[in-house]
Amino acid sequence: MTATAAMPRLDAATTPATALLHGRAPLSTGIVHLGLGNFHRAHQAVHTAAALAAEDGPWGILCVASRSAAVADALPEQDLRYAVVELSPERTRIVVPAVHTGALVAAREPEEVLAALAAPGTRIVTLTVTEHGYTFSPRTGHLDLDHADVRADLRGDAPPRTTLGLIVRGLQRRVRAAAAPITVLSCDNLVANGATTARLVHEFAAALPAAEYAELAPYLATITFPNSMVDRIVPATTDSYRDAVAAQLGVRDAVPVPAEPFSMWVIEDEFAAGRPAWERGGARFAADVGPYELLKLRLLNGTHSMIAYLGALDGAATIPEAIARPAVHGAALRVLRDEFLPTVPVPADIDVEEYTRQLFERWANSALGHRTTQVGSDGSVKLAQRVPDPALTHLAAGRMPHHLALTVAGYLCCLAPPDGFDPGPHPTAMTDPARGRLAPLRSSGSSSADGPAGAGSRGFVRAVLRGGLLGTALAEHDEFTARVAEFVDVLVRHGVAAATREAASATDVAHQA
Ligand code: CS2
């Protein structure tokens, strides 16, 4: 038996008081959270616990996993406690946020989840279901009515399979129970995440049978959907973090969450039925979150994608390893400064030099081990939020965004490598809902438009972009398609360093012209 196995389990009795954030019982549920990933547990839960520690209120969080029971089942065994392991090269700090009131699995306990959504005490529904969880078509941005799960949910099959289905069925119950208005707060990396969620909920409701929509519509008008910008780098859990908890707290935690020390949350203050004093727990309120969201989505998330794809192709297992390579570091700086930054309105209280410096420091956090595979996964839904709008801004001004084209090329080399090219273990381990669709395009695209397969990637890239990977507008720009294809070929034939040199010199030539 190892020393850790002999330790007591983390629970209410064994949580060291010095690590505890909030923890005054009994909590009542005011928030139902959909999406029990690590991000929620290291971000919203921590800010909420800190807010409640400063100003108590009826804001316990009932958290709901969509399908996976692993965390939802482990938490009750630990009295809903878990450790957030904040790591930097300088120190490890552990906090235990005690704000959860229950943990459910929607696919297994749909009735309990719907009852919680309809309960009078529930005033806020929060979401971290990833870009993927909003079931919109990346091509149109609208609710994906061809999606089998969306169709099943619109038919009313039980249990609801999609987040939107669950929310709308919960709202219908609130109407029938004459419950008070509620707020739906998206905490995902989507452009205008609140407004987007509102639009998709309305699209779902409008696709219901007319009588159901008529019953729901007046209530929908009372719901608010504030926009919010969320920011904290949160890797996946591994045994090394379990060991860190054991070493520092002397307890066994089956489900700790690693996180960087940095955390930021900016929210629009539009709550239909109250909220925790989140400003006392490190969050900020702003009248318009749009500029913060764009800054973060492009400078952080957009550059992050580039680092992940180029780093993974260059053999880097982690983001800190990737950013330590001069070619990746240089390209990341150029895409951030030359291509993302000019497309965002910088909020007045952000010092962009300092923000950029901090980003590079955060990516270089070697204590965190954030994997390129994790950031590179789901690129087909993530890139659609990060690349097309800034690319179109440059193209409209007559400039080629070489580094954005390189980012897309990096993605394609990872997810749909040409025959005979081995992208290595990290790209191969990336998961993506589009993976199965891309490979066939690779063989048909390159042979139809460019002659024999292997003669160039132009046809393949054209087929991918016309297929709607990055929306419809960017696919109209043949010169962008051509640039992506050229970078695919350079990456495949000459590697990452050559491709970044090519992007940098093409940008310099354009600047001098
Ligand atoms: C990352 C984000 O995986 C990704 O796509 O860019 O998860 C990123 O770490 C967070 O948004 C940081 O706030």
Image (spheres, rainbow, N blue to C red):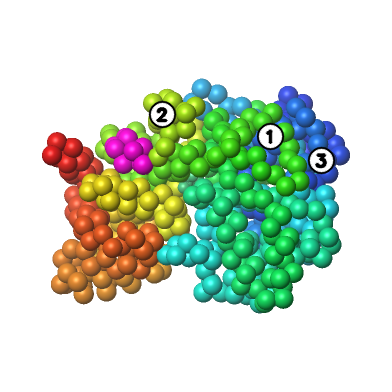
In this view, the residue farthest toward the right is 26
Q: Quadrant of the N terminus?
A: top right
Sequence-first disc among 2 and 3: 3
* Tag 1–tag 3 contact (CB < 8 Å): no
Q: Quadrant of the C terminus?
A: top left
On the question of residue 11 being in view, the answer is yes
The residue wearing badge 3 is: 58
Q: Residues within 10 Å of mark 3 (few under 14, many from 20)?
A: some
Position of 207 with respect to 368 (left or right) is: right
Q: Is mark 1 within 8 Å of ligand 1?
A: no
Q: Amino acid at mark 3?
A: Pro
Residue 341 tag number: none
Query: Measured from the top left, where is residue 230 in percent x and y?
Result: 56, 41
Which of 132 and 443 lies nearest the eye of the viewer?
132
Query: Measured from the top left, where is residue 358 in percent x and y?
Result: 44, 28
Q: Which residues are magenta?
A: 333-343
Q: Amino acid at mark 1?
A: Trp
Q: Tell me the distance, in whole angstroms, between the alpha carbons under discs 1 and 2.
A: 25 Å
Position of 241 with respect to 301 (left or right) is: right
Query: Measured from the top left, where is residue 425 in percent x and y?
Result: 37, 53
- Mark 3 secondary-structure assignment: loop
Q: Amino acid at mark 2?
A: Val
| Residue appearing at x 52%, y 49% in the figure | 192
Which of 234 and 483 lies nearest the eye of the viewer?
483
The residue wearing badge 1 is: 278
